[in-house]
Image (cartoon, rainbow, N blue to C red):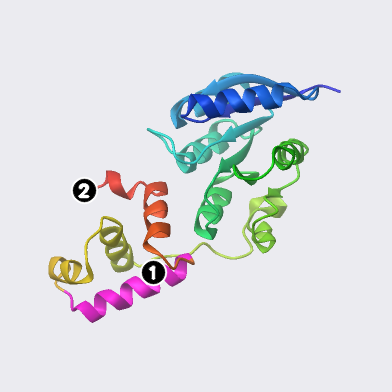
Amino acid sequence: MNAIRLVLADDHATIRDALKLLLSGEPDFQVVGEATDGQQAVEAAVALRPDVLLMDVSMPGLNGLQATAAVREKAPSVKVLTLTRHAEESYIGELLRAGASGYALKQSSSRALMNAIRAVAGGRPYLDPELNHGLLGLFVQGRSPKKKPPVLTPRETEVLRLTAWGHSNKEIASSLGLSVKTVEVHKTNGMRKLGMNSRLQLVRYALLRSWFQET
């Protein structure tokens, strides 16, 4: 049986080294490339055509979401396995809709990671056992989500972006010419649509969507 060819994309060298050491010890795995950011991950996927690309989410330049979408477009035969510490449903949904074949948590066991790699390499969707398996419906059967992604209104997006930046409801209200009550309504509705209940989750989502790079 041919070995499963892997590319490791993570901006931390220690994590890449640890993954390479772990995975190279398996007879059916072969690490053929590494990437330190999202752009390198896309380039490696196109040039090397690995069976599986292990993709971190938080990387400089192109983040994991943007890189996954680019790999899906430029090298559709490459299976992307998201490997991250973030377990929020909004993260999962965004990555799977972008074209990831699976979602694994860094805090899970090494055996779980190996199972994840073998699953996506074999064409089967994978979701970490610690997560809500109802989310598998987001990307089975050709990755056509059974439910539509959450759609924020422009005002909800504006309010949530400013909240992620650290502005108070009063400051946002003054900036947008709204009442504090109206800001609270937009924030509540937006957070509910995204399945979030804390500012930390919102900040992580903002990073994923590159909100902090916009003016």
Q: Which of 10 and 33 is in front in this view?
A: 10
- Image position of 215 with respect to 162: above or below: above
Measured as percent of width and height from the top left, residue 25 is found at: 74, 22
- Image position of 58 with respect to 200: above or below: above
Which residue was labeled with disc 2? 215
Residue 132 falls left or right of residue 152: right
Which residue was labeled with disc 1? 190
Measured as percent of width and height from the top left, residue 18 is found at: 60, 26
Q: Residue at x 13, y 70 (%)?
A: 174
Describe the element under mark 1 as helix, strand or loop.
helix
Residue 178 falls left or right of residue 156: left
Q: Main secondary structure of the magenta part?
A: helix
Q: State the separation of the CA atoms marked 1 and 2.
A: 20 Å
Indicate whether residue 53 is drawn in magenta. no
Quadrant location of residue 106? top right
Q: What residue type is labelled 2?
A: Thr
Describe the element under mark 2 as helix, strand or loop.
loop
Q: What residue type is labelled 1?
A: Gly
Q: Residue at x 72, y 53 (%)?
A: 141
The residue lying furthest to the bottom in this view is 181
Q: Residue at x 37, y 52 (%)?
A: 206
Q: Which of 38 and 130 is in front in this view?
A: 130
Say whether disc 1 or disc 2 marks the residue closer to the N-terminus.
Answer: 1
- Image position of 153 with respect to 18: above or below: below
Q: What stretch is highlighted in magenta?
A: 178-194
